[in-house]
Image (cartoon, rainbow, N blue to C red):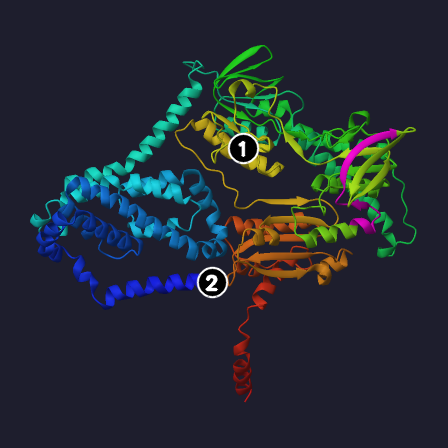
Amino acid sequence: MKKSKLLLLGLIAAIIGSYFIFDLGQYLTLEYAQYQLADIQNFKNENFALTAFLYFSIYVLVTALSIPGALIMTLVGGGIFGVLWGTFLISFASSIGATFSFLASRWLLRDWVQRKFSGYLGPINRGVEKDGNFYLFSIRIVPIIPFFIVNLLMGLTPIRTRDYYLVSQVGMLLYTTAYVNAGSELSQIDSIAGLVSLPVILSIALLAIVPFIAKYLINNIKQKKLLKNFIRPKSFDKNVVVIGAGSAGLVASLIVARAKAEVLLVEKHKMGGDCLNTGCVPSKSLIRSGRIMSYIKRGKEFGIESSSGEVNFPEVMKRVQGVIAAIEPHDSVERFTSLGVEVEIGEAKIKSPYCVAVNGKEITTRSIIIATGARPLVPLIPGLENINYLTSDTIWSLTELPKRLLVVGGGAIGCELSQAFNNLGSNVTQVDLASRILPREDEEVSALVMDRFKAEGIAVLTDHRLNKFEIVDGENYMEAHHKGDIVRIPFDAVLLAIGRKPNVEGFGLESLNMLIEPQGTIQVNEYLQTVYPNIFACGDVAGPYQFTHMASFQAWFASLNAMLGGLWRSRANYNVVPWATFIDPEVARVGLSEQEAIDKKTPYEITRYDLDDHDRSLSDGEAHGFIKILTVPGKDKILGVTIVGYHSAELIGEFVFAMTHGMGLKKISAVTHIYPTLLEANKFAANAWRSARLPEKYFPLLEKFFRWRRG
């Protein structure tokens, strides 16, 4: 700790210690105040300014140091100065003293507390940043929580000092006035208990709900202002209209239908959305074909001497379409209609918060759920318009394997398709602006994957900023800057995989002045409500995670809240969010990565289990990768898990389950896993945590005990 902090702590301790050592509390009692009241009033009449200054200074000191006696000081102020001057002096002195206490807490403790408990304080910090002034005012207006505790705790939060002072100044005014008024009759007060009657206390306490009523009214006024230009129907055709039949829309509409509410699902293109038609299903099908080819190339590792294969790319793509066709009935119009969902294929247009138009019809509805998903982001790069570029939406139309494939983007999509096409026989060059691929993962994960890619023949170019695309003598070129040098890469086909852009245009949001986040998603609250209370958004269009499983997760909350229409609301939380990148080796994660823990200053311990010595992994020829677990220091509570290896996306599920239900590594360690399985690695990782914490200092005693037992 810095010397300045130690000095302040010492000073505070000395002053508080003096208070108790010299029994200064005797001067802050009702009896002493009444006994000295006449003398003090006489001194005040002769030296008003000096008396006011001394009283003000002492009050600030008492409040700043949280010394017992502020209540008596308030009564004395009323008795000496009367209601008007007493309220004026005490109001400012108490607020200034409280702010000093707040600042001392912030300077001495905030960094340490935020660093040590950052994993728990994240939601609190966000709540304070959003509504901190409101909640502080609610606490200040009636001292349900002692003021000195409020000062200390609020100093640990992100609330601004100026806001803290101003809210305290206003919030404490009513309570201060009540006690100053009581103190004006100090000579007639028999006890502290007799200061304020029960009706007065109750009337003040009732004021505590005023801020909540005010917030409710303000929200109502905002909503009515938004809705005043729209006519609310007396009755509705539907309970909910869902726009978009991707993962989020399908799940939302099905939940509404299962609840026996009337729901209309509108899709302008294909049922199943991106996941079925251009995302998860086709990409994993292509990856599987590429993986089979990689095994053929590795045949000698498994004792197969004459293994060889030739890629028939049209047949590979035919298989991809066949898998889509096999899954398609699960998301079809016919199936959802049979389950009670009314489906319209056409373009939806939100006419008002109560009306959606589609196919020439206007449907009135109590609630709307927007689940319009996202599309590949196409950057503005000179010359791109002259190139027949591919995206994750259009690459499935390929009928010929590109001899030289350029992949722009080092995220999950770029990595998955780079490796898949490389396995199928393309010469792949992967380029990215960042310093490493898979930047959301820890550096060691990125390094492992990059080394694997390079070993397989993929040219991975990081720190490359794209300048332009051009065609020279019929040849496609990409030009980029790399550490001051110009790099030119020829290619036959280019895949853009640098991210996805939420679909927020073309269906009426513009006319509603819907609030859009800087990253392009629709602004929603924790209930997935937009600025309009009866319009909800979920999935990629709402963020913050663009995963199919998170779209389904959000759809549950959006559909429940949309159906119940404000009668009851359920809050979505993102405490346990898993994801995986389906490359070889697979990368799966849930919770914090080590880098995120460092960035958030979250204390952690690491347990690591390397898979190069795992029996089943050795048997399968996949003995590479690791399991890395972050836990709370000294405890088995899981903060995050990263798994790199064969079928990591399956292995991570046990940790996701444990984190969701508040289970620690001891629970996983106690589970019997089948031998030999990949899943057994989770138990070994949990055992590694326990082994590292064995009480070795007692081992010599145990050795002696068992020697004694042997006689």
35 to 227, vertically: above or below: below
How far across and how far down the image is residue 152, in percent? 36, 53
Closest to the observer: 233 or 507?
507
Please give left or right for residue 494 compared with residue 201 in the image: right
- Compared across the picture, whether 661 is left or right of 463 comes to left
Magenta stretch contains residue 465 = yes
User: Can residue 584 be found in the magenta stretch?
Assistant: no
- Identify the residue position indicated by label 1 in the image: 555
**Image side of residue 143 versus residue 709, left or right:** left
x 48%, y 36%: residue: 526
Q: Which residue is drawn at the image coordinates 81% and 40% (left, top)?
A: 421
* Count of numbered badges drawn on the protein: 2
Q: Quadrant of the C terminus?
A: bottom right
Residue 144 appears in the rendering:
no
Horizontal and vertical percent for residue 686? 59, 61
Name the residue at the top extreme: 360
Give coordinates of residue 202: x percent, y percent. Answer: 19, 40
Q: Where in the figure is residue 66, as x and y percent of width and height?
A: 29, 55
Q: CA distance from mark 2 to mark 1?
A: 50 Å
Q: Residues within 10 Å of mark 2 (few under 14, many from 20)?
A: few
Which quarter of the figure has residue 39?
bottom left
Q: Amino acid at mark 1?
A: Ala
Magenta-drawn segment: 453-471
**Dots 2, 1 in contact, CB < 8 A:** no
The disc labelled 2 sits on which kind of residue? Lys
Q: Secondary structure at mark 1?
A: helix
* Tag 2 residue: 2
Q: Quadrant of residue 31?
A: bottom left
Q: Classify 637 as above or below 226.
A: below
Query: Between 302 and 65, which is closer to the camera in this rendering?
Result: 65
Q: Is residue 424 left or right of residue 541?
A: right
667 relative to 534, above or below: below
